[in-house]
Image: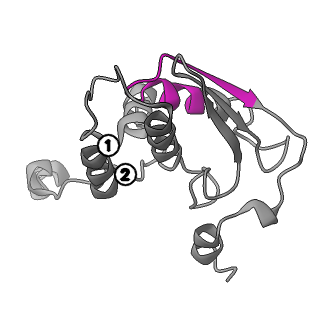
Amino acid sequence: MMEDHEAFPVDNLPKADVDRPVLGQMQNSYFLNKFLYKKTAENTAEETKVSEQPSDDGEGISKEVLEDRVIGALKEIYDPEIPVNIYELGLIYDVEVDDNLNVLVTMTLTTPHCPVAESMPGEVELRVNSVKGTKSAEVRLVWDPPWDMARMSDEARLELGLL
């Protein structure tokens, strides 16, 4: 009799799509790296457009270009309970870039009792710090004004079937 592992060799199985991680056995560092550095075709095209600037190492870029890069990075962070990114969901109130290319992100969460209330601001700060050209990043979590569904973009409303 053939053992189960011989009947179904792992080498012949298709590779899993890691964009949506499976909970359980996955190592936190692997998930965090995939979360922070996920590349999509849209992001690659946007990076190509942005890289046409005089310098792609972050030196000499304008505040506007850095702000666009930061917003692009924020659009890659998804709410863990809702399949919409935090920017389109309306959780990002403001992105400020100063003359020294320091970034301040003002954001909120859907509720103070949100399960990611302690971790989401840190994840946002890590992602913004990873954007080329950012000298430093700070995330300010605010509760006033409170978030409501009117802050969602039309894209988010469409994704959630609210349009």
Residue 79 x, y percent position in the rendering = 61, 51
* Disc 2 residue type (three-letter): Asp
Within 10 Å of disc 2 (Cα), the crowding (few <14, some 14-19, many 20+) is few
Judging by the rendered image, the residue that carries numbered circle 2 is: 19
**Residue 15 within the magenta-colored segment of the rendering:** no
Q: In this view, does 80 lie above or below 67?
A: below
User: Which is nearer the eye, 93 or 86?
Assistant: 93
Q: Would residue 90 appear left or right of 110 to someone viewing this image?
A: left
The x, y position of residue 26, in whole percent, is: 40, 36
Q: How crowded is mark 1: few (under 14 residues within 10 Å), some or many (20 or more)?
A: some
Residue lying at 46% horizontally and 34% vertically, measured from the top left:
66
Tag on residue 121? none
Q: Which-is-in-front pick, marks 1 and 2?
A: 1
Task: Residue 95: give x, y in percent of width and height.
Answer: 63, 37
Image location (x, y in percent) of residue 154: 63, 72
Q: Can residue 1 be seen in this view?
A: no
Answer left or right for 64 relative to 146.
left
* Quarter of the rendering occupied by the C terminus: bottom right
Q: Give the range drawn in magenta.
A: 123-140
The residue pinned by badge 1 equals: 50
Residue toward you, 45 or 147: 45
What's the image's color scheme? one colour
